[in-house]
Image (cartoon, helix red, strand yellow):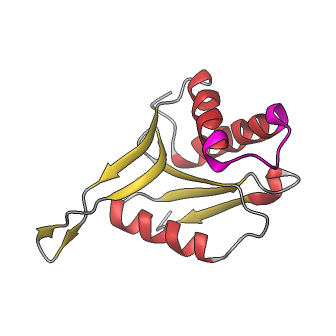
Amino acid sequence: MSHLDENALSKIIVEAAIEVHRELGGPGLLESVYEESLVEELTLRGLTVERQQQVPLVYKGKTLATPLRLDLRVNGLVIVDPKAVIEYNPIFDAQMLTYLRLTGLKLGLVINFGERLVKNGIHRVANNL
């Protein structure tokens, strides 16, 4: 499924997140549980998922000792940041936009599994898409 673009991938990711939420009966679990389950669901759907990947950060030509850590990167194109919070904070969208700019990617999804209905907790953040 490497030929999919960001929009097609995001549809599959959203469907997978809904399935994870349905299967686990969330909300109420730790973010790491949702993240691990989402990796499994995306893999079952034939996608490539990199988990907790470190991305070097360069500041004025110097690589910093502290890298950026992405929760999930799907098919190398979409960053996914799972959350498990009661109240969504708009700063999550701003953080995602920063991740997109720093990686040169165009689409990120912040998925809050803390919502009663996970479809209400999906925030799409685009960078020149």
Above/below status of 61 relative to 84: below
Percent coordinates x, y for residue 82 in the rendering: 62, 52
Q: What are the residue bounds of the magenta stretch?
A: 22-33
Q: Position of residue 104 (x, y in %)?
A: 35, 61
Q: Relative to residue 50, is residue 40 depicted above or below? A: above
Q: Front-most of 83 and 101?
A: 83
Residue 56 picture location, percent across and down? 24, 57
Q: On the rendered structure, is 118 left or right of 50?
A: right
Q: Nearer the viewer, residue 69 or 107?
A: 69
Judged left or right of residue 60, residue 9 is right
**Residue at image point 65% right, 33% down:** 37
In the orientation shown, which residue stands out farthest toward the left? Answer: 61
Which residue is painted at 47% across and 31% down in the image?
48
Looking at the rendering, which quadrant does residue 75 occupy?
top left
Residue 19 shown left or right of residue 109 in the figure: right
**Quadrant of res 19:** top right
Q: Position of residue 41 (x, y in %)?
A: 65, 29
Q: Is residue 11 magenta?
A: no
Q: Is residue 91 left or right of residue 96?
A: right
Is 24 inside the magenta-drawn segment?
yes
Name the residue rendered at 45%, 31% in the picture.
2
Image point (68%, 48%), residue name: 30
